[in-house]
Structures are given as C-alpha cells and as structure tokens.
Image (cartoon, rainbow, N blue to C red):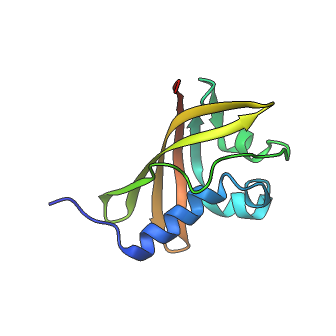
Amino acid sequence: MPLEPTEDDRRALTRLEEAMWREESRFDPAFMERHLAPDFFEFGRSGRTYTRAQSLAVPRQPTDAVLPLPNLCIRLLDADTAHVTYFSAVTCDGVVEHARRSSIWSRTPQGWLLRFHQGTPYER
C-alpha cells in the first residue's frame, strides 16, 4: 500500500517548493542554507549540473514563475522521503520557459531538506 503524505506534509512541501521560486526566499542565504541538504545537487533545465555551493552563489535576480505551481503532486517514497513533481512556467527576458520539475525532499528533525532537483524542458 503506498504511503500518503499527511495534510501537514502537503502544506509544508508545497510552501517550500514554492519558496524556491519566490525571490525573497530563493535569494535569502539563511533560508537556502537551512533547506538545501549538504549533498544537494540539481540537473538544471539547461542540462547543466549544479552543486549546493553553486546554487547558493546564484546572484539575486527577478523571478517570474507561475504560482501556485501547476500540477503539483507529492508522494512519499518512504516515511521520511518525498518526491514532488510539477510543471514550471517561468518568464525570462520576455520568453516563457516550461519545464517538468522533480524534487526529492528528506524529513529531518530540523524539517524538510531538498536533496535533489531536476528540470526537464518541454514545449507547450
């Protein structure tokens, strides 16, 4: 029988995933330090791989993403590991870029930590 996330887990993970797209939290060093796991890495929409250090070093920039995140789905892989998927629509230089997104979060005594993220572009 698949594990179902609690309503509290759904709220927390939705808030955290959306916070990664909000300029005030995405570029807040304390927020990002608190929520990126020490071994975090990302396969970006560009196809490049980003380390935690590279993700933390991204300079502040305007972020124009559609929120709430379209097609957000949360499933538990085990009691303390969540897989979050959704579509993103982000406007960059007047062009809307679409991607399918996938994140792996781990529950810790301090809260949820983002371990992995991937963005795969697609055309609408």
Name the side, left or right, on which 94 lies relative to 118.
right
Task: Report the residue at 57% width, 41% height from top.
Answer: 88
Q: Answer above or below: position of 110 versus 36.
A: below
Q: Position of residue 26 (x, y in %)?
A: 73, 54
How many numbered circles are shown?
0
Task: Report the residue at 63% width, 48% height from top.
Answer: 66
Q: Answer above or below: position of 68 versus 63.
A: below
Task: Report the residue at 65% width, 53% height from top.
Answer: 20
Name the side, left or right, on which 69 lies relative to 85.
right
Instruction: Report if residue 44 is visible in the image.
Output: no
User: Residue reaching furthest left?
Assistant: 1
User: Viewer-proximal residue, 57 or 20?
Assistant: 20
Quadrant, the N terminus = bottom left
User: Viewer-proximal residue, 77 or 13?
Assistant: 13
Q: Position of residue 104 (x, y in %)?
A: 46, 50
Instruction: Report if residue 38 is visible in the image.
Output: yes
Q: Answer above or below: position of 115 versus 6.
A: above
Name the side, left or right, on which 105 lies relative to 81.
right
Q: Position of residue 11 (x, y in %)?
A: 49, 70
Task: Report the residue at 30% width, 59% height from top.
Answer: 78
Asked which quadrant contains residue 18, the reply is bottom right
